[in-house]
Amino acid sequence: MKRWIATTPWASRGLILILMALTLLPFLSMLSAALAPSGTYPSGLEWPEAPAWGNFARAWEVANMGALLWSSTLIVLGTVPAAVLFATMAGFGLARLTAGRGRWFYLVFVLGLTLPFEAVITPLYYEILALGLLNTRLAIILPLIGLFMPFSVYWMRAHFLNVPADLSEAAQLDGARRWQEFLLVQVPLARPAIMSLSILLFLWTWNQFLLPVVLVQDPDRRTMAGALGAFQGQWGTDIPLLCAGSLIILAPTVILFLIFQRQFVAALLQVAVKG
Amino acid sequence: MRARTPAPPPSRRRAAARRQAVLFIAPAFLAYACFVLVPLCMSLFYSTLNWDGIGEWSFAGLSNYVTVLTDDDLLQIIGNAFELVLWFTVVPVCVGLAVASAIRGQMAGRFGTATRTILFLPQVIPLVAAGIAWSWMYDWNGVVNQALVLVGLEDQVRGWLGNFTFALPAVGLIGAWVLLGLCTILLVTGIAKIDGSLYEAAKLDGARPRHEFRFITLPGLRQEIGVCVTVTIIQALSSFDIVYVATSGGPGIETTVPGLEIYRLAFAHRQVGLASALAIVLMILVLVCVLPIQWAVRERK
């Protein structure tokens, strides 16, 4: 810390402090509105005389937060482990297949990297309808696994390409078959890459909005972010309650982020460096 | 069994290995095919139809694409997306560059950790929450107007998101807020990797700060800038969440973006063909914007 201060001129530290303040401002303004008496029209950023902490309890109740948390957790549990497993396997397979068919497979996956979800949402609706899954959590889980594949496969392949080839040969000389090599040698070595991928997919699943809005009508079966849309539609005019509800809804990822701060930042930065 | 059979010739062993690799890829590919490739093909197919999503359909040829590329409203909507690019991309990258070259050094220690944590917060929360937070900031009674009154600009007070002139820039600033921290941290991390002796040598040669920036910082950050621009452009062109909660596209269609219009056309106006044509156009626009940047960044490495 001392070095940072010593080598950083005051002006640039001031710049950083302003940026931090601007980043925090919307959160503070939500908090101050959330503490105003429910049903009133609060005004800007001011600490209310009698903070109405009860707004949080009421928002929890009217938005059925307990059920929402459970629903989001189920969706994450259905999506992330499967997506990570598939991507790890495919990344391993693709890193071994660098010629001919492998290249073709890889290109097809990479094609999806920039695909906006909106480009496939309409047919996905009819596909899910045909599968009879509309309004269930599987309607979010299954498409998300598929939609996550381009990035996840790209990510895991990049990791496996960096694993020295002789490691794989050594495992073969020991008579280990591919599966054993994969499970006993490669997966443990890939733990950091798998960890980062899991964090990212968790965030993107939890915060997913478009799929729940289109594919699941019942707010209690959506992700928390998806349910926030419905909550806003219903309580949008009661600003204190809306702000309290939004703060509750963004709390779980923020709390996890603060606990695993180092891993989250590393994962998000790696995306950028690799992507 | 397997261990006892004599080792097969290398070519056959290679073929077996290749078959096994394909097995490893199969589950991922299946999921990808079912929920991305097939829908994508269906999007292409739908885009040639006149269909309300329920009843009979008929072929419409390319007329949906003609509509997308000639209809005034749809062109304005696509234009809105590009105006958002200005806000989502240019603001975070410029501010990030300014901060990075001002600090030029590792953000180490506890203060650095605190900085990174706080600046990353907008990346962690759902975009919908960012949209709600900012609609309250922009409210008549919100912080933005409060601050304007504080500095004596009472005549500038307005309902920002309901204003025909200011709604789109206001939405753009929400995106800039979300992406600012990510870009800043990326560029600060990138600049720390540039060899410090380059700057010292430049100083000895009497280089001005703007020369340092032009000839050392910018080339050194080529890759990081490429990443920031790519990520932010994709976010801007395919934005949906923020607009949906902050303005629902209004006032009029001032803040409607292609993502939102696809959703509306397909599920509210029951024009599945037109929605799909817009979806395909959006996908191509993203590619056309992103691919050249990727090439430019990779080439001179």
Image (cartoon, coloured by chain):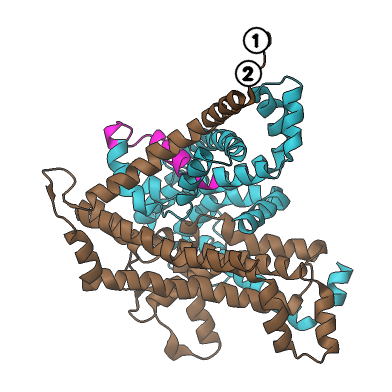
Q: As rendered, which of B187 and A244 lies closer to the eye?
A: B187
Q: CA distance from mark 2 to mark 1?
A: 8 Å
Q: Are marks 2 and 1 in contact (CB under 8 Å)?
A: yes
* Position of B273 relative to B97 (above/below): above
Q: As rendered, which of B131 and A234 lies closer to the eye?
A: B131
Residue A112 shows in this picture:
no
Q: Chain of mark 1?
A: B
The x and y percentages for residue A139 are: 38, 37
| Quarter of the view holding residue A271 | bottom right
Q: Is residue A158 magenta?
A: no
Q: As rendered, which of A9 and B98 lies closer to the eye?
A: B98
* Residue that badge 2 annotates: B8
Q: Is residue A147 magenta?
A: yes
Q: As rendered, which of A32 and A22 lies closer to the eye?
A: A22
The x and y percentages for residue B166 are: 39, 80
Label 1 crowd bin: few (<14), some (14–19), many (20+), radius 10 Å:
few
Quadrant of the snapshot with the N terminus of chain A: bottom right
The x and y percentages for residue A225 are: 46, 50
* Position of B266 relative to B4 (above/below): below
Q: Residue at x 81, y 78 (%)?
A: B198
Q: Report the disc number at residue B165.
A: none
Q: Chain A is shown in which shade?
A: cyan
* Position of A70 relative to A184 (above/below): below
Specify the chain shown as brown.
Answer: B
* Residue that badge 1 annotates: B5
Q: Which contiguous range is marked in magenta?
A: A129-152
Label 2 crowd bin: few (<14), some (14–19), many (20+), radius 10 Å:
few
**B155 sits left or right of A6 in the view:** left
Q: Residue at x 65, y 76 (%)?
A: B97
